[in-house]
Image (spheres, coloured by chain):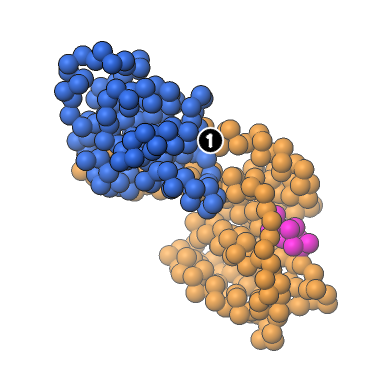
């Protein structure tokens, strides 16, 4: 089964579009007005919720924190949807992938800690010079880790490894169970967003081992 | 809260001429407009709301709001055009733009040349009330 076939819902549908850039343009025009309406409705809901909480003094029967968290999760989904539809022009710059990942690890571990989910890093110590759009890569991986932080099974353990495989750079997340179908209230579009970033760098995103591993790879030159 | 859906002319009722300082809300989406008006009303700000940029422009000529909060995307005169016209006619008038459109940095910077603040929907209630408290006087 292909990578997109292993992912349900909107994320799976958008993953299928990544290899056909013209589809993204069509989706953009279809969703632009829809996202605009969603934001207007969400704005009214968010301000009404804010006013109700303010007038109640934060008391009453409603779990305000939970209600506001639900509102934020919908806002996040709309953000991701619009980000997916926005034209992507990478701005590559040279750097060392290992150094870059080691810099990101503390923030990812902090994000995963409340569940608590372990993140073990096993990358090569050798220099791994890479030219990439580091901001886009950071946004993509941050989104993926944020999705796991909300939806992955509690006390799960993740393994991150990276290195060079012949003429390709490989970055791989592994877990005991699936990584692509988090069981959350609102689905994440982190996978198709990251897949777009990889494609823009002539790379690919693949779900392997029954979705228990996510592998990103791109040409080393 | 007073809602004026019909543009006013120079022949205003005395009650309107003597009304306290008010915030003008401009949005073609009536639900969003009403929600915003309720919130500002609860924070002690007198509000007038209209559904188009043209109505807002005409009203600003007749009455003088202390602050105009406008949506960006509207049929006819949109928020950007309204902001430019109001800024040129009333340089001291405070202006806030609220938009559901994703804005890149260049566009946001350009809009901040006209508006005192630019807020993205969904708006953070604390930030909005803070900005209104600072600008509506």
Q: Please tell me in which quadrant of the rendered image residue A179 appears.
A: bottom right
Q: Is residue A206 magenta?
A: yes
Which lettered chain is shown in blue?
Answer: B
Residue B8 shows up from this direction: yes
Identify the residue at image location x=43%, y=65%.
A114
Q: Is residue A103 above or below residue A154?
A: below
Q: Please tell me in which quadrant of the rendered image residue A119 appears.
A: bottom right
The magenta stretch spans which residues? A196-207
Residue B41 shows up from this direction: no
Q: Is residue A199 magenta?
A: yes
* Helix, strand or loop at mark 1: helix
Image spot of residue B86 (x, y percent): 38, 34
Identify the residue at image location x=25%, y=22%.
B2
What residue sits right under mark 1 in the picture?
A36
Q: Is residue A94 above or below residue A29?
A: below
**Foreground of the two, B17 or A197:** B17
The image quadrant where one finds the C terminus of chain B is top left
**Foreground of the two, B90 or A170:** B90
Q: Colour of chain A?
A: orange
**Foreground of the two, B43 or A100:** B43
Q: Please tell me in which quadrant of the rendered image residue A180 appears.
A: bottom right
Image spot of residue B80 (x, y percent): 47, 36
The image quadrant where one finds the N terminus of chain B is top left
Identify the residue at image location x=66%, y=34%.
A30
Image spot of residue A125 (x, y percent): 66, 86
């Amino acid at each position: 089964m292909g990578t997109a076939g292993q992912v349900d819902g909107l994320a799976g549908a958008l993953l299928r579009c990544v290899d056909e850039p013209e589809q993204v343009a069509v989706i953009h025009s279809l969703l632009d007005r829809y996202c605009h309406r969603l934001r207007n409705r969400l704005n009214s809901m968010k301000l009404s919720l804010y006013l109700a909480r303010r007038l109640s003094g934060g008391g009453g029967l409603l779990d305000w924190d939970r209600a506001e968290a639900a509102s934020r999760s919908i806002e996040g989904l709309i953000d991701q949807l619009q980000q997916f539809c926005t034209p992507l022009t990478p701005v590559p710059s040279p750097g060392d992938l290992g150094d870059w990942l080691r810099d990101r690890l503390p923030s990812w571990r902090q994000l995963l800690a409340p569940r608590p989910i372990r993140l073990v890093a096993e990358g090569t110590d050798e220099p791994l010079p890479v030219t990439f759009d580091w901001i886009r890569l950071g946004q993509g991986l941050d989104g993926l880790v944020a999705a796991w932080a909300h939806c992955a099974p509690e006390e799960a353990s993740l393994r991150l490894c990276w290195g060079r495989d012949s003429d390709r750079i490989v970055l791989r997340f592994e877990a005991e169970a699936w990584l692509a179908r988090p069981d959350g209230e609102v689905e994440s579009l982190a996978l198709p967003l990251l897949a777009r970033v990889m494609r823009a760098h002539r790379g690919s995103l693949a779900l392997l081992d029954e979705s228990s591993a996510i592998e990103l790879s791109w040409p080393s030159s | 809260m007073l809602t004026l859906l019909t543009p006013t002319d120079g022949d205003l009722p005395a009650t309107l001429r003597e009304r306290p300082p008010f915030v003008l809300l401009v949005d073609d989406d009536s639900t969003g407009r009403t929600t915003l008006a309720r919130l500002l009303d609860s924070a002690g700000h007198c509000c007038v709301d209209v559904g188009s940029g043209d109505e807002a422009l005409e009203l600003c000529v007749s009455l003088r709001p202390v602050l105009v909060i406008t949506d960006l995307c509207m049929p006819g005169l949109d928020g950007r055009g309204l902001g430019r016209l109001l800024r040129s006619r009333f340089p001291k008038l405070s202006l806030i733009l609220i938009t559901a459109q994703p804005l890149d940095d260049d566009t946001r910077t350009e809009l901040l040349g006209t508006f005192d603040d630019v807020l993205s929907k969904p708006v953070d209630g604390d930030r909005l009330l803070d900005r209104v408290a600072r600008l509506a006087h």
